[in-house]
Image (cartoon, rainbow, N blue to C red):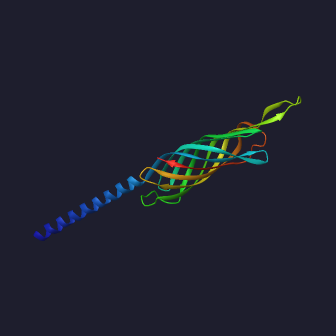
């Protein structure tokens, strides 16, 4: 009888230990399974003007959520350049992308690269100075687009702490025929390179 009691107690202790270990494992993975951050990035944008590109300072802000190796990114961005002969400005409002990460979201994985694909409401305007028939200088809008653009990006995040992380991203915006407004040679991609912090 004593042996039976010892065996029963041993089985109970073993079962309790297994359940406890399983609970701890579930809590660990549940805790580290997802990650979200709000970020601000600054950088440059290359915008098409005729047969060339204009480089302009740009800014982006957004929200990124990830779970394991998948995620979503929702952001807005804008850029503007002005020189003696033209003014160029572009925006995405908003941009929504699906993200595929190369590594799981675990505490030991401080480095993580990702690829993104999605779409956005995208706009670009190009205003140029020209001479009219009376030899007067006038501002003419030579390129204009407002509509749906396809977006692709490649990025890299580095965790600086529990919530703080740095990021760098290269993105491209390609206008589609689904436009509210279009004028000029607008079916060319624009590019964005930005660096920033998430918190």
Task: Kindly tell me whether residue 33 is visible in this rendering.
Answer: yes
Image location (x, y in percent) of residue 23: 31, 57
Can you give x and y, in whole percent of width and height, for residue 5 in the image?
13, 66
Please identify the residue farthest to the right as the structure is shown: 133
Residue nearest the viewer, comparing 163 with 152: 163
As drawn, is 159 to the left or to the right of 8?
A: right
Left or right, 195 with respect to 87, comes to: left
What percent of the width, then of the height, locates residue 34? 44, 51
Q: Is residue 122 visible?
A: no
**Closer-to-camera residue (152/47):** 47
Left or right of residue 14, residue 176 in this image: right
All told, the count of numbered labels is: 0
Q: Residue at x 38, y 53 (%)?
A: 31
Q: Residue furthest top?
A: 134
Residue found at the far bottom of this picture? 3
> Residue placed at 51% from the left, 53% from the top?
70
Quadrant where the image shows the N terminus:
bottom left
User: In this picture, is 80 found above or below 71?
Assistant: above
Residue found at the very far left of the displayed protein: 1
Residue 15 x %, y %? 25, 62
- Front residue of 93/193: it is 193
């Amino acid at each position: 009888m004593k042996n039976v009691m010892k065996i029963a107690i041993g089985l109970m202790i073993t079962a309790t230990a297994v359940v406890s270990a399983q609970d701890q494992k579930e809590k660990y993975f549940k805790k580290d399974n997802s990650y979200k951050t709000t970020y601000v990035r600054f950088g440059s944008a290359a915008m098409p003007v005729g047969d060339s590109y204009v480089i302009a300072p740009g800014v982006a802000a957004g929200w990124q959520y990830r779970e394991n190796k998948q995620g979503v990114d929702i952001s807005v961005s804008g850029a503007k350049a002005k020189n003696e002969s033209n003014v160029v400005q572009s925006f995405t409002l908003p941009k929504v992308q699906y993200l595929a990460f190369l590594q799981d979201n675990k505490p030991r994985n401080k480095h993580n690269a990702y690829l993104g694909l999605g779409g956005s409401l995208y706009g670009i305007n190009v205003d140029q100075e020209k001479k009219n028939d009376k030899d007067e200088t006038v501002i003419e809008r030579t390129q204009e687009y407002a509509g749906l653009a396809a977006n692709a990006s490649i990025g890299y995040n580095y965790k600086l702490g529990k919530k703080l992380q740095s990021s760098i991203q290269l993105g491209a915006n390609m206008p589609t025929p689904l436009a509210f407004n279009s004028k000029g040679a607008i079916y060319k991609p624009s590019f964005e390179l930005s660096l920033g912090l998430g918190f």
